[in-house]
Image (cartoon, coloured by chain):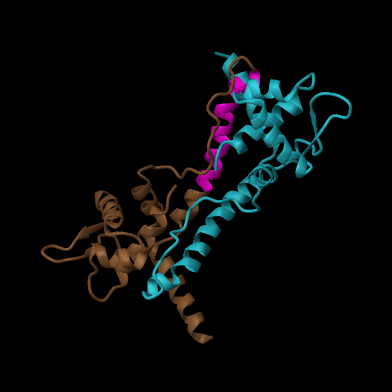
Chain colours: A cyan, B brown
Amino acid sequence: MDTKFSSAIHMLILISEAETPMTSEEIAASVGTNASYIRKITGLLKKKEIIESRQGATGYRLLIKAEELTLLEVYRAVSESEQVHVFDLHQNPNDLCIVGKHIKPVLKDVFRSIEEKAEQELRNTTLRDCMDRMRREIESRSDR
Amino acid sequence: MDTKFSSAIHMLILISEAETPMTSEEIAASVGTNASYIRKITGLLKKKEIIESRQGATGYRLLIKAEELTLLEVYRAVSESEQVHVFDLHQNPNDLCIVGKHIKPVLKDVFRSIEEKAEQELRNTTLRDCMDRMRREIESRSDR
């Protein structure tokens, strides 16, 4: 996976928190990328009805409350996949060997159970949780 | 991650189960790759004392019992990393923006907690578990 997921969380915090709506260019400046990459991500988030463009105005708005928007929904939107993918499977095990013949379904099962744990954790973490962590991070830094 | 992890599990099942010790070439034929790739993986597994070459003979043997060898140890050996890596972080958030300035530690924490769940699950799964699943897979196929 590339950095679309982490960029999307960054962007969603901006959309949720900014006092004035931000354009793709302004979001790109904060994320540290270009506006076309941001528009690619906003396109994916719109498709899944996580955000929408503001009617007759610049910027975007959330369609799901930050405390209800899970990171799993964000991941699925930007990866265009229902499942979190962690481990790659070797593609050409040899059918003539009994281990080679049966390894794929075995490893698929094992890997899936691990990926499901990651999915559970993403489902249990909301955009609001990320924003709360950021608030604590900002406060802890300003104490120093 | 590439397919070293899944290839390593395949190979370890072969090493553990084969009636006669297998050479790198024979293992490569079952995994569906070349012997130099297999030797690269056996090198990494030897370094972590998971397997050793058989003294004065071809083939390898396990140094850790299959029921004690966790997939986390295998993962760490072949990825040459202590931590399971799932999500990439965007690298250039802008320090001039308060969100850009604080996003990295926040996402690192969030991603780490998800990766730890994957690590727990890998720690709870042994090579023996994989072999048991394979046995069930073989039995269920031969019933049909």
What residue do we see at 22% from left, 70% from top?
B21
The magenta segment is B98-117
Q: Which residue is most to the right?
A: A56
Between A135 and A54, the one nearer to me in the picture: A54
| Residue B58 drawn above or below residue B77 | below
Rendering coords of residue B120 (x, y %) = 48, 51
User: On the picture, is B96 further left or further right than A65?
Assistant: left
Rendering coords of residue A13 (x, y %) = 70, 29
Rendering coords of residue B138 (x, y %) = 45, 78
**Quadrant in the rendering for residue A14:** top right
| Residue A34 drawn above or below residue B128 | above
What residue do we see at 54% from left, 33% from top?
B89
Q: From where the camera sits, is residue B66 visible?
A: no
Quadrant (top left/top right/bottom left/bottom right) for the C terminus of chain A? top right
Does residue A136 show up magenta in the picture? no
What residue do we see at 66% from left, 53% from top?
A82
**Quadrant in the rendering for residue B14:** bottom left
Between B18 and A121, the one nearer to me in the picture: B18
User: On the picture, is A95 further left or further right than A2?
Assistant: left
Q: From where the camera sits, is residue B23 visible?
A: yes
Between A111 and A42, the one nearer to me in the picture: A42
User: On the picture, is B53 further left or further right than A128?
Assistant: left
User: On the picture, is B144 further left or further right than B9?
Assistant: right
Quadrant (top left/top right/bottom left/bottom right) for the N terminus of chain A? top right
